[in-house]
Image: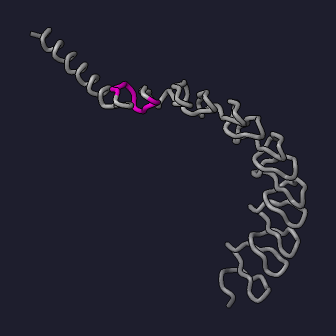
Amino acid sequence: MNFQVILFGVFLLLLTKLQFYEALTCNGINVAGNACCGSQGYYTSSNACCNGLIVVGNACCGSQGYYTSSYTCCNGLIVVGNACCGSQGYTTSSYTCCNGLIKAGNACCGSQGYSTSSYACCNGLIVAGNACCGSQGYSTSSYTCCNGLIVAGNACCGSQGYSTSSYTCCNGLIKAGNACC
């Protein structure tokens, strides 16, 4: 009796698989897969259809397949990285493309790369800080730029800096508290 139950289970499993395969029709032909490439079926989880050919990968570069998790297509060439700089690939988490050259950082200042978390590009120069005050860099977490001067605080009252959490600017004068009167 147990043998019949197992046999029936196997039969149901095979029937289910056959029905799954028959669910896809490519150009009138029943095929296995979840997408068509001409008359052939394929699974998009591991293959792509490039110029009518089923290839390994999830994207096409001409008639070649590749995986976008590690590679990209630059000017018809498969290269390592997730972005192109001309025909070279690079990874945008660590590098950027400045005037056709791959540089360390996530932004460009002229033809030089830099990291915006620690530096700023002020009048074409890379300087420490995350903002510019003229050609000088400063950190906005502690300072602000008032009339071209870097001063402590997060707001300006005339040319003086102050902290809005403790002070108020009243008619050009800094007063303690959050009210002018």
User: Quarter of the image holding residue 18?
Assistant: top left
Is 8 positioned to the left or the right of 113 in the image? left
Q: Residue at x 40, y 32 (%)?
A: 34
Query: For residue 160, what is the image quadrant?
Result: bottom right
Q: Is residue 17 magenta?
A: no
How far from the left and from the top, in percent, is residue 100? 82, 43
The extreme left residue here reads 1
Q: Main secondary structure of the magenta part?
A: strand
Query: Within the magenta stretch, is there residue 34?
Result: yes
Where is residue 159? Give x, y as percent: 85, 78
Q: Position of residue 51 (x, y in %)?
A: 56, 31
Rendered-image quadrant of the N terminus: top left
Q: Position of residue 179 (x, y in %)?
A: 66, 85
Outermost residue on the front side: it is 28
Q: Residue 102 falls in which quadrant of the image? A: top right
| Quadrant into which the C terminus falls | bottom right
Query: Residue at 17% across / 12% down in the picture?
Result: 7
When the figure is inspected, residue 180 is found, relative to residue 27, above or below; the finding is: below
Q: Which stretch appears magenta? A: 29-38
Is residue 141 or residue 167 the one in the foreground?
Answer: 141
Q: Pick whichever, 35 or 111, lies toward us.
A: 35
User: In this orientation, which residue lies closer to the viewer: 3 or 60?
Assistant: 60
Quick one: 77 or 164, which is closer to the camera?
77
Q: Residue at x 83, y 60 (%)?
A: 138
Question: Which residue is located at x 57 percent, y 33 percent?
Answer: 59
